[in-house]
Amino acid sequence: MTYQNYSLKQLQQIDAAHHLHPFTDHKELREAGARVITHANGPFIYDSEGTELLDGMAGLWCVNIGYGRDELAEAAYAQMKELPYYNSFFKCSTPTPVLLSKKLAEIAPKNVNQVFYGSSGSEANDTALRLVRHYWVLEGKPEKNRVISRKMAYHGSTIAGTSLGGMDAMHKQLNGAVPNIVHVMMPYAYELALPGESDHDFGLRAAKSVEDAILEAGAEKVAAFIGEPVMGAGGVKIPPASYWPEVQRICRKYDVLLMLDEVITGYGRTGEWFAAQTFGIEPDTITTAKALTSGYQPLSALLVGDRIASALVEKGGEFNHGYTYSGHPVACAVALKNLEIIEREGLVDRVRNDTGPYFAKALQERIAGHDLVGEVRSIGLMGAIEIVKDKATKERFLPSGSAAVVVRDHAIANGMMLRATGDTMILSPPLIWTRDTIDMACERIGKALDLAQADLRKR
Ligand code: PXG
């Protein structure tokens, strides 16, 4: 029986009776009822009532090639018919993860040539943490096991992912994080730069917090630094240009490994295959997922740099780690087709040379001037809009985080799906957006801001 045989009300009732949702206040959801998205095409999603929404979030930062791609369905169908599953354990392999690994090595930074697969970004970060700690054991330095991360970082929702991440609300519910992970300041100039401090100087100061943490623990105890090149779920926080080169210099100086989490920034989002290339970073690991398959299949790939991979191969023996679905043949077939489409349609170059700059200009010219907007920022096709009560003082509406939700709700009512995190509106659209789609988005967001302004000024 397909869902078409159920009314929206019935689906909502069954959902409320049996389905526990991620990051959701269940009581609230059960009272309101979920919005049920039933189909999608190109840049648009549709709910059960037929409402069309322009999807400003590419699903959840993942549907980079847009919806309705028959080729991906066909790739999955063909692979399922030929070989739906076989494992990659016990000296076995299947063709699609082999070919995908070769492709990923081609597009990754030049020191990165090996791949370990999982089904989610969280799993990939668990793998990364285990691998990095194991590396230092192999190097005869088992005490080098601490990891430095950042406040407000998002690295997933498993126990390791949550521990690596810097979200207070998530840590509170952990009641016991993975030990030896510390969190330093984020490179977020809009709120954290001192009066009169230049972006450049702020970037260096934020990087210095990494050095301070290394020195505090003792370099001989620090395994790695982990960071999203651009913080995503934490609010599209784009570091100043001075930040990453300095972090890399510091990591090298103290022989601390550099782990990048590119679950959001990977596969074209910033105008290169990886943000490592955008920022000129040579990382030891790169966590990727989401747009690897444009979300059409669950798949993650931890890209492993030569330094760690060589130690693992030469002196590692058996690495006692892996998942049933590591290198899943169907997910890898879909990933191969997805990367082929991104390449064939030149989406990465288009973001770098055309839509990315146009998006930045449109946000600056059409959104930044609005009374409710403290700052807009973007890189490639990811952007943020800071909602403030007072542009000059950066004062926010109270309670904190409430204003962006008002903007979001008006945006949705005006045909634009976007996300609010704290007081920040977030955009991360499919890379198939054109200049026309960007215009349409700006028009809808502008309208939402006007309507929200009327509501919020009444408070
Ligand atoms: N790292 C980063 C940088 C992420 O953004 C993960 C790891 C975990 O991936 P999985 O596949 O395990 O979810 C993510 C996921 C949000 C939101 O609210 C963002 C994510 C997940 C859920 C919600 O923006 N990113």
Image (tube, grey):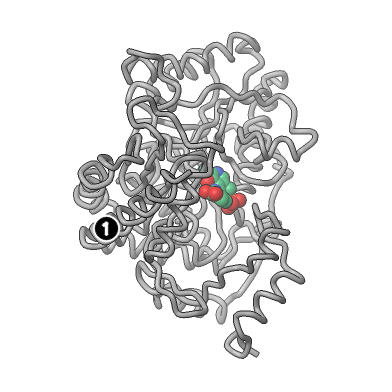
Query: Disc 1, ligand 1: is the CB inside 8 Å?
Result: no
For the N terminus, which image quadrant? bottom right
- Horizontally, residue 168 falls left or right of residue 43, namely right
| Tag 1 secondary structure | helix
Q: Residue at x 38, y 25 (%)?
A: 393
Other-residue count near label 1 (Cα within 10 Å), few / some / many at <14 / 14–19 / ≥20: some
For the point 31% across and 59% down, the residue is 444
Instruction: Name the residue: 51% across, 74% down.
Output: 76
- Residue toward you, 73 or 21: 21
- Residue identifier under label 1: 443
Of residue 249 and residue 17, the one placed in the foreground of this image is 17
Left or right: 386 as drawn, with respect to 166: left
- Percent x, y of residue 414: 37, 64
Q: Nearer the viewer, residue 39 or 407?
A: 407
Vertical order, 424 against 291 (above or below):
above
Residue extending furthest right? 175
Q: Position of residue 420 (x, y in %)?
A: 48, 48
Q: Is residue 287 visible?
A: no
Please state if 173 lies on the left or on the right of 198 as rendered. right
Vertically, is 1 above or below 436? below
Q: How many labels does the image show?
A: 1
Q: Quadrant of residue 318?
A: top right
Q: Is residue 399 above or below residue 37?
A: above
Amino acid type for the residue under numbered disc 1: Glu
Q: Nearer the viewer, residue 51 or 432?
A: 51
The location of residue 203, given as percent across then percent down, is 39, 20
Residue 336 falls in image quadrant: bottom left
x and y percent of residue 113 in the render? Answer: 46, 43
Q: Is residue 187 visible?
A: yes
Q: In which quarter of the image is residue 380?
A: top left
